[in-house]
Amino acid sequence: MDFLRNNLANILTLGNLFSGTVGVIQLLAGNYEITAICIVISLVLDFLDGFVARALKANSALGIQLDSLADMVSFGVLPGVTMFMALAPFGNELGSIGLPFEVKYLGLLITLFSCLRLAIFNLDEEQTYYFKGLNTPANTILIFGLYYAFMQNGDFSFLLNNPWLLLILTAVSSLILVSPLRMISMKFKSMQLKDNYPKIALVVGVCIIIPFFGAAGIPLSILFYIFISLLFQKQLR
């Protein structure tokens, strides 16, 4: 029983890693619905491993390392590969500019900056009640959500059919991961209403956006998350 109590959180983390790996494989195979399911499973397991570790008082240095390594695949490799696939149809041509490599490889900048963001998070002791920069799960939902909505319904075609806009999105996505901007975390510092206005605004907004816009509402909810976080910068301390 002690072994299970001490390692249950790590088992959940490994489940996150397994789900993220399957998600990448299914993404490359074009099975976007399965990839979406894998992302949801990884998100749930990523939440549960920390919750279980705290509840069982089984926090460990091993668990911290495993968590980041699992997140690197589920929320680092996966969004990078998503952008890789979004840019793949454009070959090495950007308008009249010929490149000595295929432009799709620039999409993997998201993976590199996700790795950097996870390393910074592990060393930063300030990020208790807020995130500094966009967290990797939210970035994954944004990038994959845009691609998924496009492949399913043709949403955001203005973006996905333009390699320049995709490269701009890649750059913005990469930089916001490591930016000093404070972003809302769902951890509660207090139960006072005034201290939780950002979280309330976020939850209400997301509950309206996703039912109204459907699949397109998934990435739009992340944009709303970024907007609300910027709006409440002074309260995110």
Image (cartoon, rainbow, N blue to C red):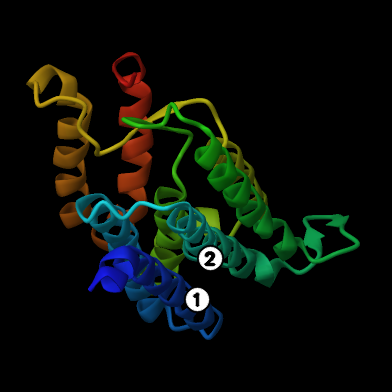
> Would residue 146 be seen by someone viewing this image from the given angle?
yes
* Separation of marks 1 and 2 at Cα, in angstroms: 7 Å
Q: Is residue 142 above or below residue 33?
A: above
Name the residue at 44% across, 77% down: 18
Q: Position of residue 204 (x, y in %)?
A: 14, 39
| Furthest residue toward top | 234
Q: Secondary structure at mark 2?
A: helix
Residue 199: quadrant of the picture: top left
Q: Quadrant of residue 107?
A: bottom right
Instruction: Quadrant for the N terminus, please.
Output: bottom left
Can you tell which quarter of the image residue 116 is in? top right
The residue under label 2 is which amino acid type? Val
Crowdedness near tag 2: few (<14), some (14–19) or many (≥20) residues, C-alpha within 10 Å: many
Residue 29 position in % (x across, y down): 53, 86
Residue on which the image places disc 1? 21
Q: With 94 as the anchor, is 98 left or right in this view?
A: right
| Vertical relation: 110 (above or below) 21 | above
Q: Amino acid at mark 1?
A: Thr
Q: Measuring 81% from the left and 65% from the top, which residue is drawn there?
A: 92
Q: Are marks 1 and 2 in contact (CB under 8 Å)?
A: yes
| x and y, in percent, of residue 177 in the image | 54, 40
Residue designated by label 2: 73
Q: Secondary structure at mark 1?
A: helix
Above or below residue 140? Residue 193 is above
